[in-house]
Image: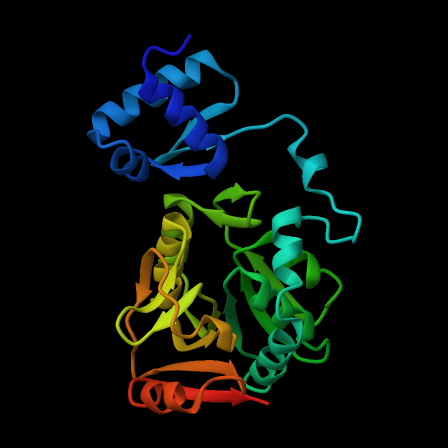
Amino acid sequence: MFVTKRQQLMFSYIKEKVVVSINEVADTFKVSVVTARKDIEILEKQTANIKKVHGGVIWKEEDIEEKQVQHDSLTYLNERFSERVKLNPTKKKALANKAITLIQDGESILLDAGSTIYEFAKTIPNNKKLTVLITALNIAEVLETNHAVTKIILGGVFRSKSTTMVSSMMEQTISSVHVDKLFIAASGLSLSHGFTCNDILETDVKKGLLASAKEVYWLLDSSKIGKISSFQISPLKRNHSLIVDSGIQMEDKRKLEKELNVIIAD
């Protein structure tokens, strides 16, 4: 039996999130980091589903690989991600087609996770010699048969809900990486809060990605303009570029152009 009601709630929270940092647990349950660690240690002893990792905790589930296999042949995608792929497909393809014109033979590029970046990865031609650093397993799968591309998967704790790699291990790996171009996604974009994300662990990874590239290209469809998610990834910066579809409102475009480079994908 769980010792406290808090630990019961903590168990449910970790199960839902799959991968959680110690700091997030402490903040969510209004306890110290020390107390959060002790609670997690108790949970780890009581159930095989909870496992401590460096800087956080993960939820383990039997036959998790089988649960992730989808009948649409996207091996690593779970049902939630498959639904995201279906949202605004025309806009995502437009963003991908515009972004692909920005890469040159021989460059090194870094790919964030997400359904828009997934679409971009599908458009990378097999006649360009590129070094592609990858943060999500489903994107690695897309590029598996592209033999012109050297593929490097950045390691970390695998997060099944988004097929991404997270944790402090991932952040340490990213800190040693330097590439020509980064293609990155976000949940929302606003003038007041910049680029934002709904997930604190993925936010930390994205911040690390931003420090690793000479050029930064944000890929967002116009439905995300004006949205503010829970965690800020980055404020708007003049040396960053936004690739957005033609559905963007002209007033939004005018205001954003004062803060960063805006590229319209027709």
x then y, percent, for residue 7:
35, 20
Q: Quadrant of the N terminus?
A: top left
Of all residues shown, which one is farthest toward the top? 1
For the point 62% across and 71% down, the residue is 88
**Residue found at x 56% / y 81%:** 99
Residue 175 against residue 96 in the figure, above or below: above
Residue drawn at the location 47% of the way across and 45% of the way down = 156
In the rendered view, how is the structure colored? rainbow
Front position in the image: 109 or 26: 26
Q: Is residue 88 left or right of residue 133?
A: right
165 lies above or below 117: above
In this view of the protein, can residue 110 be seen by the observer? yes
Give the position of the C terminus as an image quadrant.
Answer: bottom right
Residue drawn 62% across the image and 81% down it: 94
**Looking at the rendering, which quadrant does residue 103 occupy?**
bottom right
Apparent side of residue 129 relative to residue 226 in the rendered image (left or right): right
- x and y percent of residue 106 in the render? 57, 80
Query: Where's residue 8, x and y in %?
Result: 39, 20
Can residue 18 be seen here? The reply is no
| Quarter of the view holding residue 197 | bottom left
Locate residue 39, reporting x and y percent.
31, 20
**Left or right: 59 with respect to 140?**
left
Extreme-left residue of the structure: 32
Count of marks overlaid on the render: 0
Front residue (pair 168, 32) = 32
In front of the other: 143 or 94: 94
